[in-house]
Image: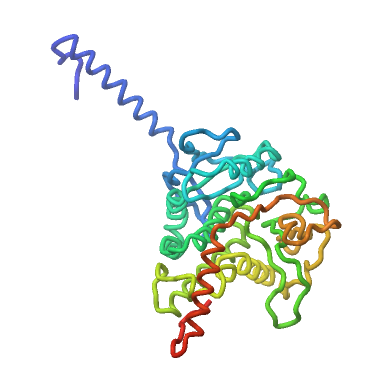
Amino acid sequence: MFSVSNLKSSRSVRVVVVLFISLTLVYSFYLGWKPLHTLSPSSKTSLQTSATGSAGSIPHTPPKGPLSSDPKSYSITNTAINGVPDKVWHSAKTDSISEQQRAYINSWTDKNPSFRHELLTDRSAEAFVRAYYQQTRPDIVQVYEGLSIPILRADLFRYLIILAKGGYWSDLDVSSEKPSAEWVPAEYKGQHIDMIVGLEFDFETRGPGTEVASQFCNWVFSAQPSSRNLQVIVDSVVNTLKKIANDNNVSISGITLEMLSDVVNVTGPKIMTISILEGLKQLLGREVDDRDFAGIKHPKLVGDVLIMPGVSFAAAQNGFPKDQGDALVTHHYEGSWKQADAEAKERKKQQQTQPGRRSHVTM
C-alpha cells in the first residue's frame, strides 16, 4: 500500500495529491451517471442503454450549430393529455432543415409552451431503434436497418419512436393550430386513451367483407408509451415487409417500390388504419369498421382510441368542413416521397404491359 512516508520530496507529494483529486472526480462522475431506461414494448421489461445517438432537442429559437444531446428522462404526470408525454418528435435526413420547417416545428411550442421537441436524424434514428429494440425485438431492428427506401424507414420509425417513448408525432410539414389540452373533449378527460388519430379520408362503409373505406392519417398522431395499438401497427408493418421480401425472393434490403402495390398499404396510413381496427376488434370482441366513426362531427372514443373528425388533422383533405369544430393541425403537404412512388408505379405498369414479360410484384 502506498504511504506518504515513502515520498522523497514535496514535488512527489503534489503529484500524488493531484492524482488523488483527479481520480476522485472521475469516480464521482461515474457514480452519479445512470443509463437511460425504457419499457420494452414487447415484454414490458426494463431495457438499459447508454445512448440514443445524436438526437437533439430543438429550442424555440433555433441554434446555428448542431442540436445538443438531450437524453434525460421526464415525468408524464400533469400532461396536456393524461398519460401522453408533453413531447413532440420529428425526424429528418440531417439536422439541416429549412426555415419554413423550423417555423412549423416551433408552432408546437407556440401553442403548447410546456412541450419539448426532439429531432432525430437518419443516423440517430438508427441508433435509437437499435438501443431500444435489439434486446427484445431483434427482428424489428433487422427489418428497419435493412430497408433501403427512405419513406418505408420513415413510416416505420414514427411508430417505433412513439411506441418506445410516447408523446406526439409530427411530420416536418405540419403546424400546430390549437393547444393539445383542447384535443380531448370534457366527457373523455377521465377515460383511458391509448392513442389519438384523425381521419384523413372520411367515407361510409362499403359493406361487409370489404376493406375499410376511411383512413387515418399518420403525419400526426399521439399515444402513450408502450401503446397497445402501436404494438399492433408495428407487428403488421414488420410482417408485411417480411412477406414482400419472401414473395419476391429478396432480402429486406432488396425491396423496391415496384414490388409494392402502394406505400400507404405497406407502411403508411392504410396499414396503420387496418391495424388499429384489428386491434380494436381484439379489445372489444366485435367487428370495428367505418360504421363506428364515419361522418363524425366531434371526437369519438372507440375502445381506447380517440378518433378525431376530418377537420382536426386533415381539413384540406376533407374539404374544410364547417360543422366539425376547428382544425387542430395543418398539413402543408411537402412530402418528397410521392414523386418517387409515382415513378415506381409507372415503371411497374410498363413492366406489366410489355409483351412476354411477367412482373413478379406483390404487396
Give the residue furthest to the bottom.
Answer: 356
**What residue is shown at x 46% (from left), y 37% (from top)?**
66
Picture residue at 69% right of the left edge, 56% below the top: 196
**Residue toward you, 122 or 221:** 122
Answer whether residue 236 is visible to the viewer in this image. Answer: no
Above/below status of 326 relative to 106: below
Residue sitting at the far right: 323
How is the structure coloured here?
Answer: rainbow
Residue nearer the viewer, 9 or 128: 128
In the image: residue 298, left or right of residue 159? right
Horizontal side of residue 340 vs 307, given as left or right = left
Q: Position of residue 320 (x, y in %)?
A: 79, 57
Horizontally, is 131 left or right of 89 in the view? left
Q: Position of residue 156 (x, y in %)?
A: 53, 61
Residue placed furthest toward the top = 10
Q: Position of residue 167 (x, y in %)?
A: 62, 49
Closest to the observer, 58 or 279 = 58
Q: Quadrant of residue 299?
A: bottom right
Quadrant containing the N terminus is top left
Counting every numbered tag in the picture gives 0
Is residue 68 something one can see in this rendering?
Answer: yes
* 124 versus 311 height, above or below: above
**Farthest-out residue, left:** 8
Q: Residue at x 27, y 18 (%)?
A: 18
Above-or-below relation of 260 to 335: below
- Find residue 300 and report its horizontal and vertical position in percent: 79, 60
Apparent side of residue 241 relative to residue 168 in the rendered image (left or right): left
Residue drawn where x is 50% and y is 68% of the image: 238
Give above or below for 187 relative to 66: below
